[in-house]
Amino acid sequence: MKQSLAAITNRFKSSGNDAGVKKFGTFGGVFTPNVLTILGVIMYLRLGWVVGNAGIVGAVIIILMAKTVTICTGLSMSSITTNIKIGAGGAYSIISKSLGLEAGGSIGIPLYIAQTLSAALYIIGFTEGWLRVFPDHNPMLVSSIAWIGLLTISYISADLAIKVQYVIMTVMAVSIVSFLMTPAPVLPEVNYVGNFEKANFWVVYAIFFPAVTGIMAGANMSGDLRDPRRAIPLGTMSSIIVTMIIYISMAVVVGLVSTPDELLNNQMVMVDKALWGPAVLAGIMGATLSSALGSMLGAPRLLQALAEQKTVPFYKQMAVKTASNEPRNAIIVTGIMIEVAILLGNLDALAVLITMFFLITYGMLNLVVFLQQSMQIISFRPTFKVPRFVSLFGAVSCTFMMFLINPVFSVVAIFVIIAIYIWLTRKGLDADFGDIRGGLFLTLAERAARLADQFPDHQISWKPDLLVPIKDPKVWAGSMLFIRNITYPSGSIFAFTVKDDEEHVEEDQAALTELLSPLKEQNILVNSVVLEDEEFLHGAKLVIQTLRGGSFRPNTLFMTIGGEWERTPIVDVEGNGSVIKKIGSFRKRVFGPTKRDDTINQVVSLASKYKMGVILLRQHPRMAFGVQKNVNLWLRDKSPNWHLAILIALQLQLNWGGKINLVTVAENGEEKAHLRDFLNRLSDQARLPSTTEFHVLTGSFKEVLSTAPRADINIFGLSVTESGLPLSFIRDMPELVKTSCAFIIDSGSESALV
């Protein structure tokens, strides 16, 4: 039902302000979670080590390089969130709405696991920091108390968690100021350029890079934001810039007041140099707690978003939210997983894999934006625009960073995502929103077609692309198996029917689609259309002439030649003057030229005029296609009309797994040796299978038909005379050879020898 513009506008206005649901703004919902996740323990405990190896200048270069990746990703995310109405789940929602639920889920599920394990890692990190102050405390007890406290905060409400994060942010701000106001004097010899004593440049870079991740913390809260389109771009980019300034400032200060030995060997150098050391210790523990709390806020919301689209087990339970928009079932499940991970102990081995999943997510976001920018579609019109180079650089950089940090874990992460994608594809997920996949492949096809048009058509690239006129799709099913066997795996089919009844066009289209659906299910490219026209011939002409201008035009006309076979007593002549011809225990009415025959002749003539090959199938009423094994291919030495026949025979042999019999007829014994040599040379030049057999039959054509080798179909080359097709010959042949028959006319564009 159509809606007014005002109604749509009101719906969007109200969508972010549901009654009783607490929504967050840019500062609380995006900026704060991002900053607290980015400013983690690496800043306090490893930044000095980075400066000790790389020197002040080298450390600043490393920070800028790492930040460039997240800046590109932040810009890409900012761009796409101003183009679509992002739902819950942040990156998962963006990827799903662009590349489909399967792609979104294949990224979202590992990202959820990564965030869950990250929370466990941060809690373990907090415990290690706590034990530096209180070494006698039980580490498992400390971790469990921290876990209970954080889980309680996140379970009560996101609002409470945000307020707690404000407190932690204040503590961290005091610790940073305390360090930057260090009373330590500037050293007389400052290490501006390091000698990378402990590790080379790229190893140092790889160790530092996880410090700048965390830019998704705010995006994961997308379902709880008042205005995601504004909050995510503004909050994400401001958090990236602010934390970059903090990192550079702290790197410069620690390098100015610390000796190389202190930087390389004392992880607590910032505590020692600070104006007030306990403030930095509090900042270290606050950083781990804030990162853990950010993950415990984002991970359940991502799980709930995955469950809403049925991409995870027990989705009905996981999709439940309270009236205040809290996914408490998902919070409980996530909390249990975190505690299990803590109890298992050291998760350092998984830390690298966690980083891989984050980088893949960043890379996919950049790729999504790059693809939509490249497609140049009108639906992609973000209010925040970025150059295409930015998203491309972000995608490439993320991939580079993955393999730089750990090639083995990079491959493992990619295989995990591929496996999840295959699993979700088999589930047959049904999204309630559209995505760009269809448009993406159409765009690629259009660009490929433009490139293809710059090159001449060549026989070496021939494949069976059939044009199939269908009189009545409701009763036309007998030839589908044969069509499948001459087009699979790389061919295509364009089927059409012509109707003069406007009222039943949709019904006929549905019947045509149903008829062709088995072929489509086998990944054969199938298109179909029902034309409204008073005459079949006129409609067929329109189709053939119109398709001439397309890039994906059919190259072969496929038609069936019908005839009424019926078991009846045999008589010689009927009263109406038609001749009854006895063929075995069957009979067939043979009339003079009919309107149908004239139509067949004209359609074939039109196809030949426009350089299309022709396949005419006359199916045997009882034998059909036998056991679908052997093919008899009849050839003549002097005939030029055999290339398409060989290609079709090869297609059948490929799909039937049988053998090809090359059959020809010699008028006498003297000619037999010459023809056998002809078949042998032809088989060699056409590279026919080694199982191909040669049969040279002696006598007249009609006499040798009964002595031909047994086959499941006989293929004949066909010549068109001035009087048209030899339709009587075509209709009689199946009973004479006891199989279905295909009659083939070359277009001149095929070659069986290339």
Image (tube, rainbow, N blue to C red):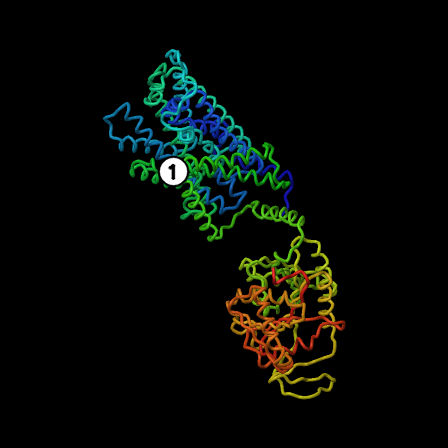
Q: Nearer the viewer, residue 11 or 267?
A: 267
The quadrant where residue 402 appears: top left
Q: Is residue 576 left or right of residue 203?
A: right
For the C terminus, the quadrant is bottom right
Q: Position of residue 135 (x, y in %)?
A: 25, 25
Q: Position of residue 264 (x, y in %)?
A: 35, 23
Q: Nearer the viewer, residue 191 or 11?
A: 191
Q: Residues within 10 Å of mark 1 (few under 14, many from 20)?
A: many
Dot 1 lies on which element? helix
* Residue drawn where x is 38% and y is 11% of the image: 185
Considering only vertical position in the picture, is 166 above or below 154? above
Q: Quick check: can you spot residue 20?
A: no
Q: Is residue 54 left or right of residue 225?
A: left
* Residue drawn where x is 73% and y is 58% of the image: 545
Q: Quick check: can you spot residue 426?
A: yes
Which residue is denoted by mark 1 in the rendering? 116
Amino acid identity at mark 1: Thr
